[in-house]
Amino acid sequence: MATTPTTRVTALARRMRVDIDTATYPASQYQQLIGIEELKLIEELRTESDETYEDDGAAREAVTGYNWRIEAKIKHSTNAAGTSIDSVHAFLRNRFNAAKASNVASAEFGVRWYDRNGLAGDSFEGRAYVKAWPHDGGGTGALDTVSVVIQGQGPLTPITNPAASAVPAVTGLNPAGGPTAGGNLVNIYGSKFTGVTGATGVKFGANNATNYTLVSDTHIVATARPVLPAPSR
């Protein structure tokens, strides 16, 4: 008698990716939150009692809204030389400090999460602030971890999964402009950069970059070429 093969495969928790928008609105510059050890993507309904005499003592609730947040334990990271904190980790810490010092609205930023393998149905984006930034501590041999809480502010909006397309996409440049003489370094942020190769892989308009370094799937550092003058007639 033939046995029946399973028709399901359990998804892995590590499939989820979180990106942080480090640009100042209305610009957008999403960068990956690296070093995640544990992750909870929480959506909760807000309810009020809606019980009446007609329910004869049985509870009844009405949904009046919802809230959402991200709880993540991250390995607090530096660059390879140990001379500077990871830029996204530093951004989140600075946003936490800003929320302590002033109105929370001034410390908000964009955040999105999605399946890193491109699966649809679990991709969302919204505004948030850093509500908690506790170092977990430990003994002399412990790693430095932070249990960060990113609290949603306003709606959580479904989006198209940024990883669904294999085509590289640029979401931000820093700086956004430069001298016509070129030669300046430009940080390029986006997604699907891993497949970018060759001398023509990065262009500024019609001009190839002088050179570039693929930092990660979401980050390229390139040297801009001079802008050529328009041909005379």
Image: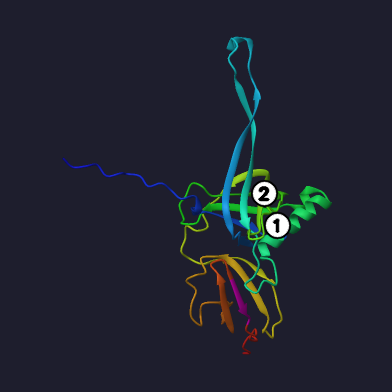
Give the residue furthest to the right.
101
Q: Residue 214's x, y, as percent?
A: 55, 74
Q: Residue 118 or 84: which is nearer the viewer?
A: 84
Residue 37 location, quadrant: bottom right
Q: Residue 112 or 8: which is nearer the viewer?
A: 8
- Assess whether residue 222 is covered by the magenta stretch: yes
Q: Is residue 119 above or below residue 62?
A: below
Q: Which residue is mark 1?
A: 92
- Magenta-drawn segment: 220-224
Residue 3 location, quadrant: top left
Residue 203 visible (yes or no):
no
Q: Quadrant of the N terminus?
A: top left
Q: Quadrant of the C terminus?
A: bottom right
Q: Horizontal placement of 124 versus 167: left or right?
A: right
Q: Horizontal placement of 232 versus 95: left or right?
A: left
Task: Look at the numbered disc 1 and give the secondary structure of its residue.
Answer: helix
Question: How much space separates mark 1 and mark 2, taking CA atoms?
Answer: 9 Å
First of labels 1, 2 by sequence position? 1
Task: Look at the numbered disc 2 and give the secondary structure of its residue.
Answer: strand
Q: Residue 161's x, y, as percent?
A: 51, 54
User: What residue type is disc 2 on?
Assistant: Ile
Q: Which residue is mark 2?
A: 150
At 59% from the left and 9% from the top, the residue drawn is 56
Disc number placed over residue 231 in the picture, else none: none
Q: Is residue 87 above or below residue 136?
A: below
Q: Main secondary structure of the magenta part?
A: strand
Q: Is residue 47 above or below residue 134?
A: above
Q: Residue 64's x, y, as percent?
A: 65, 30
Residue 145 location, quadrant: bottom right
Q: Are marks 1 and 2 in contact (CB under 8 Å)?
A: yes
User: What residue type is disc 1 on?
Assistant: Leu
